[in-house]
Amino acid sequence: MRHGKSGRRLGRTTSHREAMFRNLVTSFLNHEKITTTDAKAKEIRSVAEKMITLGKRGDLHSLRLAASYIREKSVVTKLFSTIAPRYKDRSGGYTRIVKLGIRQGDAAPVSLIELVEEEMKPQKVRKQPAKAVIAPKVVAAAPAAVVEPAEVCEASAD
């Protein structure tokens, strides 16, 4: 039984899988969107969101933790200087996965994972005044041809 064992193994050894996730997250944060399979996109979503949360904390320890996972120093700098401040008022949900269809070569389901772009702005709740209920207008319809029940019975008997 696999109680408490989370995550997909993706047919790879542990070291290969971890290296692949590090490469995917680095590319994702560098380009802000990548196309990959559904399973890989769902797996790197949690890692990428944790990296953005580290960027939002912004202290030295967070910087070192992010740098230990992300492969390129320029991407770490981009994460802390441009990506993380964009989501300072957002408490999670920094990524979006859009399903694109299937890949022609091996029929694998392919998705686009991207950073959510819109700024999070607190919305003011507007109270609209109650509108008066207006009765619908009754339109006089043209009289329809009336069919007698006897005619219907005779027509169905034929």
Image (cartoon, rainbow, N blue to C red):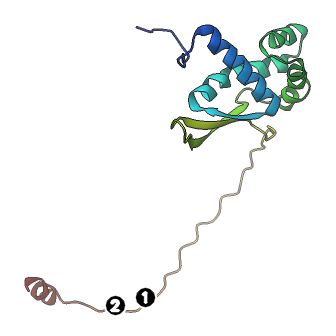
The image quarter containing residue 22 is top right
Q: Position of residue 153 (x, y in %)?
A: 11, 84
Q: Position of residue 47 (x, y in %)?
A: 69, 19
The image quarter containing residue 67 is top right
Residue at figure coordinates x 26%, y 91% from the top left:
146
Res. 49 visible in picture: no
Residue situated in front as seen by the camera: 157 or 24: 24
Read off the residue under disc 2: 144
Residue situated in front as seen by the camera: 129 or 81: 81
User: Which secondary structure lies at badge 2?
Assistant: loop
| Mark 2: amino acid | Ala
* 149 sits to left or right of 42: left
Residue 37 vs 64, above or below: the answer is: below
Res. 148 visible in picture: yes
User: Which secondary structure lies at badge 1?
Assistant: loop
Residue at figure coordinates x 54%, y 38% from the top left:
105
For the N terminus, which image quadrant? top left
For the C terminus, which image quadrant? bottom left
Q: Residue furthest front?
A: 105
Estimate how packed mark 2 is, as few (under 14), some (14 to 19) or many (20 or more) residues with alpha carbons within 10 Å.
few
* 88 sits to left or right of 39: right
Q: Disc 1 vs disc 2: Cβ atoms closer than 8 Å?
A: yes
Residue at figure coordinates x 54%, y 73% from the top left:
135
* 32 sits to left or right of 103: right
- The image's mark for residue 141 is 1
* 42 sits to left or right of 68: left
| Mark 1: amino acid | Ala
Q: Position of residue 96 (x, y in %)?
A: 68, 35
